[in-house]
Image: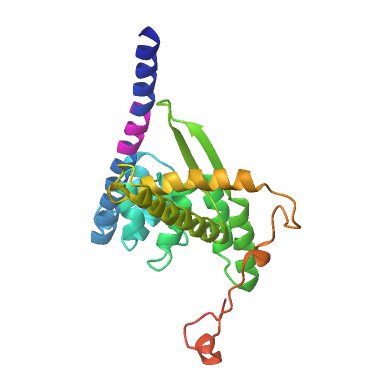
Amino acid sequence: MGGVDLDDARHERMDRVAVLFGEITAATREFLRAVAECHRHGDWAEEGFGSCADWLAWRIGITRNTASEKVRAALALESLPLISDAMARGAISFSKVRALTRVATPENEAELLAFAKAGSTASLERLVRGWKVMDRAGEQRVERLRHRMRTFSVFPNGEEMYVVRGLVTPEVAAVLMRAVEAASDALFTQSAQDGDGADPERLEPEQLRADALGLLAERALAAGFAGDGAPVSGSRAERYQVVLHVEPQTVKKHGEPGMS
């Protein structure tokens, strides 16, 4: 019993750290919202300062550069509802928000936010640096950055369960989800046919996908990864190809960058 109590206390301490950080992040979002409002009303000018950043640096005792970054991020968040909401919930830190707001727009914020949630701040900043110079060469550079950001880990959560976390490229995600969906359908059909008392319709989709992941692993181990002339792994081009037909006038349209 003593060991269990010690484990409970340890988890409570670690959970408290995470909860407090989330609360600090949410409070920081409120701080940035207040900064944006002061900027919008020009309150700093009434105090005799040349800019909101100058006033903020003086008012809260930070450097001019740090103040400029906070003002810039605060103003950018006003037009980025998804990123703003994620920060308000404590889901992403200010460090990630600072990086995101350098390149995020209402059109691309959902994609960038997904990277921010799954990867580290350092990985996100590398992605942002590539995103800022987006041209045809830049697209290839960003693709390489995305590839380097790939990660996969499985670790115990202290409650006799395991947490699966990862960040994969769109190509791998597409293959994985197709396989999970196929395995989920097979499990659903088999459970309904067996009539073993387990109603597949009562399973949450997340539960069914978790069972499907186990089935995929079992089938993969049973099939092996060599023999029959099949490569252990193939290039993305070998997995599948997507052919996209685009009319010339589409890429020449005013305002379109003409990129793939």
Count of numbered labels shown in the rendering: 0
Q: What residue is drawn where x is 41% and y is 66%?
A: 105
* Residue 154 drawn in magenta: no
Q: Say which quadrant the C terminus sits in.
A: bottom right
- Nearer to me, 247 or 83: 247
Question: Measured from the top left, where is residue 52 in percent x and y?
Answer: 33, 54
Q: Which residues are magenta?
A: 16-23
Query: Residue 78 appears in which quarter of the rendering?
Result: bottom left
* Residue 20 drawn in magenta: yes
Q: What residue is drawn where x is 42% and y is 49%?
A: 209
Question: Measured from the top left, where is residue 89 in percent x and y?
Answer: 30, 45
Can residue 50 be seen? no
- Nearer to me, 255 or 145: 145
Is the residue 247 above or below the residue 78 in the image?
below
Q: Main secondary structure of the magenta part?
A: helix
Question: Measured from the top left, where is residue 151 in percent x and y?
Answer: 57, 46
Q: Say which quadrant the N terminus sits in.
A: top left
Query: Residue 79 appears in which quarter of the rendering?
Result: bottom left
Q: What residue is drawn where x is 33% and y is 46%?
A: 195
- Nearer to me, 41 or 134: 134
In this view, which residue lies farthest toward the bottom?
Answer: 249
Q: Is residue 42 left or right of residue 168?
A: left
Q: How is the image coloured?
A: rainbow
Can residue 171 be seen? yes
